[in-house]
Image (cartoon, rainbow, N blue to C red):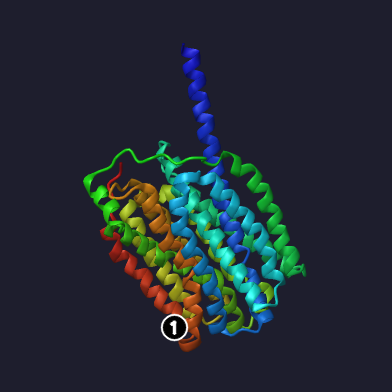
Amino acid sequence: MFSSKTAHLDHATQHHAQQRLSTLLCFFSLGLSTAAWAPLIPYAQQRLHLNHADFGTLLLSIGLGSMIAMPATGLLIQKVGCRAIISVAILLLLMILPTFALSNSIIIMSVALFLFGTAAGSLGVAINLQAVIVEKNSTKSMMSQFHGMCSLGGLAGVMTVTALLAMGISPLMSALAICSLLVIIGLIAVPHSLSEIEKDKKINPEEINNKTRKFPSPLVLLMGLVCFIAFLSEGSAMDWSGIYLVSEYGLKPAFAGLAYTFFAIAMTIGRFAGHHLQRMLGEKNIIIYSAICASLGLFTVVMAPHWIVVLLGYSLLGLGSSNIVPVMFSRVGRQNVMPKAAALSCVSTMAYSGSLLGPALVGLTSEIMGLSLVFGMIAALLMLITFLNHFTQVKAS
């Protein structure tokens, strides 16, 4: 009798460990694939002969794909589970990445970017919901670690492609190198992803009213707004930091990925230290200090007299941005005013639209007022998070 219970516990522990590993690898794959695009951007802009405004318009294709995919994923995932969404999204990313290094056609590039946004958006919703469920079934906070793996994947992606380009490797071969890593990760992670989603056990009258109205709760909307601002700063770093170094400081395109590399290094360190920082500072204070640090970093980018100082600014931005989104997603997982899947879909849609749609708006407005002024406006928005933080508090379960 006791041996059977022990065997059952061992099996449950092993199963949870496999799900945790799968979630970590899935976050890594999202960061790896999306960040690999960053060093290729200056090449794509030059190859297509586009100015900032036209390139920003082209980037709208990413936002459009993600905005369509993320709400649809929130509905579809209830029926098919996370595993099916994750496998299709990773496969789509594998097919699209080489196109970014090859296409000379604006039409083909826009279609590729639309599918890229679709895949990244769907993958983001699926893995964040899986992360909430895995964290819920655990005895400790894991969200910072999960998002830390996304940052680590982003760091691996941007450093790998930047290093290959600096060594004279073609953009196509650099993209294929990332694809080979995605294949290996997918084969390990996908089989242990969640095949079905747990239903919420606690349903209160306010949640039922939300279902009837089919409108997100104000609490969830504010969480989404905070994530939108944080991801907007991250998206501007990914899509525009390289162009900023090339256009403002005259760096060669092969070294344009340095800015995002420093950003990704700082963000990775911050997220892996997030659990300890949260215990030391408290959940409320870590959001406030993080927002101030991120805003200071972006203001440093704007005021930098030399490109090396720009790297310092992006490091502060990465460190400050690192723990805002993980804390917000943990709060989404603890709230009971909306079903978890619906709330995650709403917040993910707002968050990733900041990362995917925001850079397009940066390009459009920068052609009018310049990248420096646009970055200054984003820095001001980051300071707004310190105010919004007060209205997104959720008691620990």
Q: Is residue 77 above or below residue 102?
A: above
Q: Residue at x 27, y 56 (%)?
A: 213
Viewer-proximal residue, 142 or 3?
Answer: 3
Q: Is residue 89 above or below residue 173?
A: above
Q: Amino acid at mark 1?
A: Leu
Q: Quadrant of the C terminus?
A: top left
Outermost residue toward the bottom in this view: 368
Viewer-proximal residue, 126 or 23?
Answer: 126
Q: Residue at x 61, y 70 (%)?
A: 111
Q: How many marks?
A: 1
Outermost residue toward the left in this view: 205
* Lateral position of residue 118 relative to residue 332, left or right: right
Q: Residue at x 47, y 50 (%)?
A: 76
Q: Position of residue 22 (x, y in %)?
A: 56, 43
Q: Position of residue 271 (x, y in %)?
A: 48, 53
* Lateral position of residue 364 relative to residue 251, left or right: left
Q: Position of residue 70 (x, y in %)?
A: 46, 59
Q: Position of residue 333 (x, y in %)?
A: 37, 47
Q: Is residue 113 above or below residue 189?
A: below
Viewer-proximal residue, 19 or 142?
Answer: 19
Outermost residue toward the top in this view: 1
Residue to which mark 1 is pinned: 373
Give the class, few, some or many, for how many residues have Cα within 10 Å of label 1's Cα (few <14, many ≥20): some
Q: Is residue 341 above or below residue 375?
A: above
* Lateral position of residue 387 relative to residue 372, left or right: left
